[in-house]
Image (cartoon, rainbow, N blue to C red):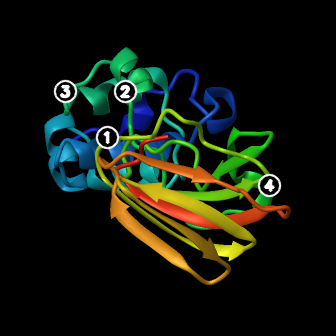
Amino acid sequence: MSNVDEYSTDNLTNAELGFDLGTRLRSVREQYGLSQRELARRAGVTNGTISLIEQNKNSPSVASLKKVLDGIPLSLSEFFTLDLPSQDQIFFKAHELLALAKGAISLRQVGRNLRHRKLQILHERYAPGADTGTLMLQHDGEEGGIVLRGRIEIVVGGQNRVLEAGDAYYFDSRQPHRFRNVHDQECELISVCTPPSF
């Protein structure tokens, strides 16, 4: 077996690529269900070579990377444009929450891309008088939440209730529903829905 270094011309670096090449190669390899050893065998390189690239301890040339990708098989253009689930972020600072709505109703989402996620978590704020509207919300899934402060009126199907701090709700989102702050103080709550629907 040959070592990919013998093909080196201009080596690819993470800084030039704008992403982590090693992590991307590992993600692609795992997506195709290949072990490092199997990919190395198919590509005609050593197992250590694959390992070093994935750990970013070896920056391959374009020719070297192509040789490795031929073992999948995958073209260079497919490798660079393949839509992969982003590396999962686990913790989020307050400023990292994604603003989905601002104004009388503020919705801030935990996480940016939920395409491969099953759950959506929102930090919601309702100014006095804020209302999701007379056109009731309705979508597939389930949702629930806990009121942190203030009071909110929630209408679900034919039922309505005013919830206060510490109160919670949980319902089938296919039922028509509406949220209104009919009080003179801001209401704040944390909600979750599955699947993501906002």
| Residue drawn where x is 77% and y is 49% of the image | 129
Residue 149 location (% of width, % of height): 74, 75
**Residue placed furthest toward the right:** 184
| Residue drawn where x is 28% and y is 38% of the image | 2
Q: How many marks?
A: 4
Residue 23 location (% of width, % of height): 46, 48
Could you give the CA–CA distance between mark 2 and mark 1, rounded to whole angstroms?
Answer: 8 Å
Residue of label 4: 95
| Residue drawn where x is 68% and y is 80% of the image | 165
Q: Nearer the viewer, mark 4 or mark 3?
A: 4
Residue 166 location (% of width, % of height): 62, 84
Residue of label 1: 28
Crowd rating for badge 1 (residues with CA inside 10 Å; few <14, some 14–19, many 20+) = some
| Residue 162 located left or right of residue 86 | right
Circle 4/circle 2 CB separation < 8 Å = no
- Identify the element where label 2 is drawn: loop
Could you give the CA–CA distance between mark 4 and mark 2, rounded to whole angstroms?
Answer: 29 Å
Residue of label 2: 82
Would you say residue 82 is visible in this rendering?
A: yes
Q: Nearer the viewer, mark 4 or mark 1?
A: 4
